[in-house]
Image (cartoon, rainbow, N blue to C red):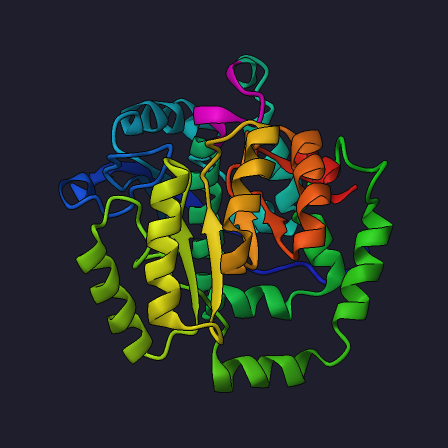
Amino acid sequence: MADLPVLPHFGITIKQLVTHDVRFPTSQLLDGSDAMHTDPDYSCAYVVLETQGSTCEGHGLTFTLGKGTEVVIAAIQALQHLVIGQDCGKIFSNFGQFYRSLTSESQIRWIGPEKGALHLASAAILNALWDLWAKLEGKPLWRLLADLEPERIADCIDFRYITDALTRAEAIEILRKGKIGIENRIALLQENGYPAYSTSCGWLGYDSDLLRQKLRAFIAEGWTRFKVKVGSSVEDDIRRLTIVREEIGWERLLMVDANQKWDVQESIEWMQKLAHFKPLWIEEPTSPDDVLGHATIAAALKPLGIAVATGEQCANRVIFKQVRV
């Protein structure tokens, strides 16, 4: 690492960390509703990092559902002494080490570690730092990441607890291989954009008329991939998915999401009843911490051509390591 060029931004320090509790009353129209979270108010704990030595600010957030956002704000404030006064160049030259310092404070880590409200708080701060780094470089964040050398990306990772699955050297080798053809992929991305799906038409609380209205509007905009919430009632899921297929046809992709609603066997039996709608995947059918359960579900649904997606509430790299293996 010593022979790598030093990144700039030394001398720019974090002067202040400001928090905002931002909430939207999405529960009034059931926007965002799913089988587990029936009346969410989509919200966030928002962080602004003010700097000394630059006019740039870093903005970051972590997603919440309304109540409890104040708990995440309190956790962010409990961590701010680890951020204020820090030199940006020092942080960005070894982001992985800074991550470890943020998540390993000897007293605060006990109420995690690296999970729950404390980890959401860490995420808001880290997101703000990534935003600040990109702004200091004068690039969108995706381009900052694309331009970083493999060694620098590896420096952003705390490899503690995961070296049995992925070492720093192995990560660098993967990243080096990924550099092959990167400019062609960037050009393709800039020309065509990044493929995406919409969930905004498929919230569980929408009635039939609104569901059709939303689907037609998104199809008119050119969307070809749709995700629909399921899990409260098999009969109602069949009714709603029948409407979805009537509107999107069979040439467009359909995914479904249970938001952690079911037990393992229940997931298998439920999805067998929805298989004729040909969903590409079922997302988070069971507890996000149940790696073995997800594996069991995936094996049972594979003959039906249904994959299993998970990771939205995967707490940390240790769980991801198990999912990967």
Return the residue nearer the eye: 174 or 274.
274
Say whether residue 114 is magenta: yes
The spot of residue 251 in percent (x, y) is: 49, 76
The spot of residue 213 in percent (x, y) is: 20, 66
Residue stretch in magenta = 111-119
The residue shown at (36%, 27%) is: 72
The residue shown at (84%, 44%) is: 167
The residue shown at (59%, 15%) is: 106
Q: Is residue 20 left or right of residue 290?
A: left
Q: Is residue 93 left or right of residue 35?
A: right
Locate the C terminus by quadrant: top right
Q: Is residue 123 above or below residue 92?
A: above
Return the residue nearer the eye: 30 or 75.
30
Return the residue nearer the eye: 286 or 163.
286
Q: Is residue 179 above or below residue 305?
A: below
Return the residue nearer the eye: 7 or 226.
226
Farthest-out residue, left: 28
Q: Is residue 35 left or right of residue 282?
A: left
The residue shown at (18%, 59%) is: 209
